Image (spheres, grey):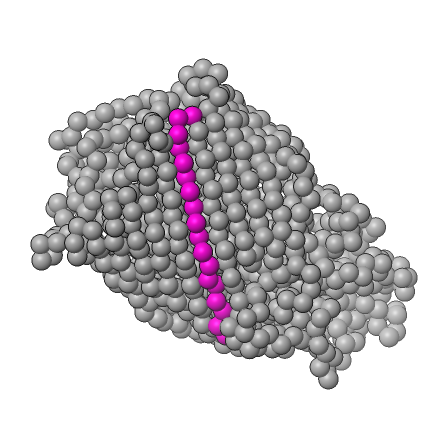
Amino acid sequence: MLTAIGAAAPLTMVQAQTPAPTELPPVTVIAPSPLSGTRSIKPAARPVVRTSRTARTRAAPAQTAAAPEGGTGVPSPSDRDSSLLDRDKIPSNTEVLTSADFSRNYSTNFLDSVNRKLPGVTLTDQTGNPFQRNLDYRGFVASPVQGTPQGIAVYQNGVRINESWGDVVNWDFIPEKAIDRVSLVPNNPVFGLNAIGGALSIQMKNGFTYQGVEGEVFGGSYGRVQGSVQAGGQKENISAYAAFESAYDRGWRDYANSSHVNRMYVDIGARNDDTEFHVNFTGASNLLGNVAATPVEMLNQRWSSVYTWPQSTMLQLAFVNATLSHNFSDTWSFQGNAYFRGFRQTHVDGNGTDVAPCDDPTTLCIGDGLPVFGPANGPATPNTLGNAFLGELDRNRAATNSFGGTAQFTNTDRLFGHDNHVVMGVSVDHGNTKFTATSELGTVDQNLFVTGTGVFINQPDAGLSPVDLRATNTYTGVYLTDTFDVTNRFSVTAGGRFNYAQIDLQDQTGTNDLLNSSNRFQRFNPVIGGTFKITPNLTAYAGYSEANRAPTPLELGCSDPNHPCMIDTFLVADPPLKQVVSHTVEAGLRGSWGRDARTGVLSWGLGVFHTLSDDDIIQVTSPLGVNNFGFFQNAGQTLRQGIEAKLDYRFDRWNAYANYTYVDATYRSAITLSSPNNPNALTNDAGAQFVNVTPGDHIPGIPAHRFKAGVDYNVTDAWKVGADLNVVGSQWIIHDYTNQSPKVPAYSVVNLHTSYQVTKNIEVFGLINNVFNRHYYLSGAFYQTGGFTSAGGLPNLMAQLSDPRTFVPGMPLAAYAGIRAKF
C-alpha cells in the first residue's frame, strides 16, 4: 500500500443568531425559548407545544459549541441550562449543521455531508475507501490514517474521539442517523489538544430531542446496500433513543476494496426541573478495504487499477459515556461527563519489500546485504522461492482502552450591571495502548496480490523488526473563558486553557530500549476576542488565540531519521519532538438581510484568518528511499492564512448557497528535508536525496482554492430537486516540498439529488454523484519505481513503470436510490 503520511473538555454551547436562515428538523418544542445567558423557566411551569415530526415547523435556533462539553447530550431540546451563549457573541467564524443536513437525500455518508456545506472544508483520500477519508479544514487535517499529523480536535457528546494512539479520527464509528447537530469551531483553545486548526463537535440525538420511528434503505452503484432504523421516545421525565446502521459497499476499485460497516447508538435519559442525566453507548464493528495511491501510468491505462493488495482494516469500538447537567440556580449550572472507550484496530497491508537475493542468490538479504532476520553477521535466509517476485505482508494491531471525564461550571450573574457569561472546568483523559506489528515475507503475482511465505522479517539494522509496545498517555486540562457585554452591542471574550500531557512508551520485547521514554508537555493557551453589532443584522468579530498539540505516541516512537519506520506499522527509536503551538488571528463580518416572503432571507459572512504554527510536526520520507518508510520531525514554522466567504439565500421554493475559501499554506523556516523518489531532489555524498525548503514554499497536499455552490427547488410540495457543485483547486504532490513537480490538477464535481414525499410517512429519494463522470485526482505522492525483485533473477515485475508519481483517483459516476418510512 502506498501511503501518503501525512479528553473530554469543556461543555458550553452557543446559541445561533436569531435570524436562522435554515429550518431545523421538526422536534418537540418547549416554549418560550430561553434568553441568552439565562436559565430558562422550569419545564413544569412552561406550556408544552408538541409538533409532528413530519410537519414543517420552525424549531429552536441551531447551536454550536463554544466549548467541547456542549456536545454531551445536555442541554435538552428546551436548552435548559445556563451554559448556552448567543452564537453572535463568538469572535470566530463558527458553522452549524443539523440532522437535516445529514439526510441521505443529499449525500451517502457523514463526510460528504460535512464537505457539502461547510466553508473551508475539503476531503482528501489516502485509503481509497469512502468511509476513511481525510477532512481538511483551512489546511489542517483530521484523518483515520495512522501517521497523519492531526490538527483538528473532534468531539462526540463532549468526549474527544481522537484515538489515544495516533490522534486519528475513525469517521466510520459515527452512527450518522443518530447525529443531532455538528458544530465547527475555529480559534478556541478550550477544546484542548489538537485544536490548532479548529474543533468539530458532534451532538447526538436522545429521546427528548427525537420522537418517533424511522426506517430507511438505499443502494446503488458498486454494490452499495445500506439500511438503518432509529427510534426515540419520551414518557414524562424518562427518554430512550436507539439507532442501528449496516452498510455494504463493494468498492469501485479493482479487487479487494469492499467495506462492511455495522454500528449502533443507544441513549437513556432522565430529567426533572433542574437536572438531566444521560447514559449512551456507541458500538461498531467494521471491515474496510483499502487501495490507496496508484502509479499514474497504471491509472492512465485503467482508472480503477490498484498497486499491491490485499489491504484491509478491521475496526471495533465500545464507547460508554454518562453526562450530567444540573442547574443550581437561575445563574449557576454544572455540566459533566465520564466515559470509557475501548478501541481495536487490525491492519493488513500487502506491499513491496526491500528483501532481495544476496550476492549469493541461494540466500535472501535485506538492506545492505543483511540477513532477513538475526544478527548482522548471522546466516542469511535460504532462497527457496524460485522465480517468484518478492513482497511483504505488513500487519499491525492497536488495542486501546481510554477513560476520563470533564467537570464544568457556568455562571451568568451580571457583573457591574452588565451581562456576563463565565465557563470554567477541568478535564482528564487517560489512554493505555498495546501496539504490535510484524512483517512477513511474501510473493507477488501478476495481479500484484501478495501472498505470505511464513518467513517473518526481523532485521533492526534495516529498520524492520517486530514491535510490541505499550503506550500510556494522560492529558489534563484546566480552562476558563468569560464573555462580558461591555454594551448591548459590544461583547468581549477572554480566557484560556492549561494543558499538561504525559506520554510514556515502553518496549515489551526487551530488545529495543530506544523505544522506552517518558515525555512531558505543558502549555497555557490564551484566547481573546470581541464582537460588535454594527446594526441588528450586521456583526463584526475579531479574535486571537493560541493552541498546542503534543506529539502522539506514534510520532514519538518514530522520529529518528537514522531508524525510519514502516508507516503506519513500525516503531524503532525515540529522539525528542517538540510540541506544536499555533497562533491564530481571525476577523470578519457576518449578517443577514430580508425577513419576509417578498424578499426572501439572505445570510452571509466574510472573514480572514492567519494561523502561524511553531515547531510543526511533519512526516518525512525515509532517506533509504523505500516505499512506506518514513519518520516524523519538527519543521520550524508553518503558516496557513486565507479568506472565507459564504452566502445562503432562501426565497419561496428556492434555497441556494455558495461559499469560497482561499488557503495560502507555506513553510516559514529554511529546512533541509529528505525527499527520495523526488525527481527534483539533490543527492549528497552518502547518496541520500534531499531538498532545501525555503520560506514561502507551499505545503504539499493543501489546495489553495475551494468553491462550493448548490441550489434546491421545491417543484411541488412533495417533489424536490437540487444540484451541488464542488470545485477544488490544484495542490502540490505530497513530499514535493520545494514545489518543482507538476501539481495535482484542480477538479470540479457536480452532484444531483431529488426526493418525493409519496405519503405523509413515506419518502423516496435518489442521488447521482459525479454526474459528468469526471476523472480527477484527490491527492498525489512519490513512490519508488523499479518494480518487484525476482527471487530467481528474472526481470523485475512492473519495471516498465518509470514515472515516480502516484495518485488517489476520484470515484466515477455513481447513482443511488432509497426509501424512507416514518411512524
The answer to whether residue 721 is magenta is no
Q: Residue at x 46, y 59 (%)?
A: 642
The residue that appears at 36% across and 31% down in the rendered structure is: 600
Q: How many marks?
A: 0
Q: Residue furthest left?
A: 417
Q: Nearer the viewer, residue 810 or 742?
A: 742
Image height check: is 735 above or below 11?
Answer: below
566 relative position to 804: left or right: left
- Asked if 100 appears above or below 747 in the picture, the reply is above
Q: Is residue 104 visible?
A: no
- In the rendered image, residue 96, in percent from the top left (x then y), is placed at 38, 43
Nearest the viewer among 184 and 464 is 184
Question: Which residues fall within the magenta stretch?
Answer: 634-653
> What residue lies at 89% left-to-right and 59% top-to-bottom?
387
Residue placed furthest toward the top: 759
Quarter occupied by the C terminus: top left
Which image quadrant is residue 785 in?
bottom right
Image spot of residue 435 (x, y percent): 54, 61
Q: Tell me the chief SS of the magenta region.
A: strand
* Residue positioned 39% across, 30% down in the render: 651
Q: In screen coordinates, is 141 left or right of 199?
A: right
Residue 188 point in image, percent of width and height: 34, 58
Seen from this angle, which residue lies furthest bottom?
685
Q: Nearer the viewer, residue 22 or 37?
A: 22
- Kindly tell me whether residue 102 is visible in this rendering: yes
168 sits left or right of 429 in the view: right
The N terminus sits in image quarter: bottom right
How far from the left and from the top, in percent, is residue 15? 28, 44
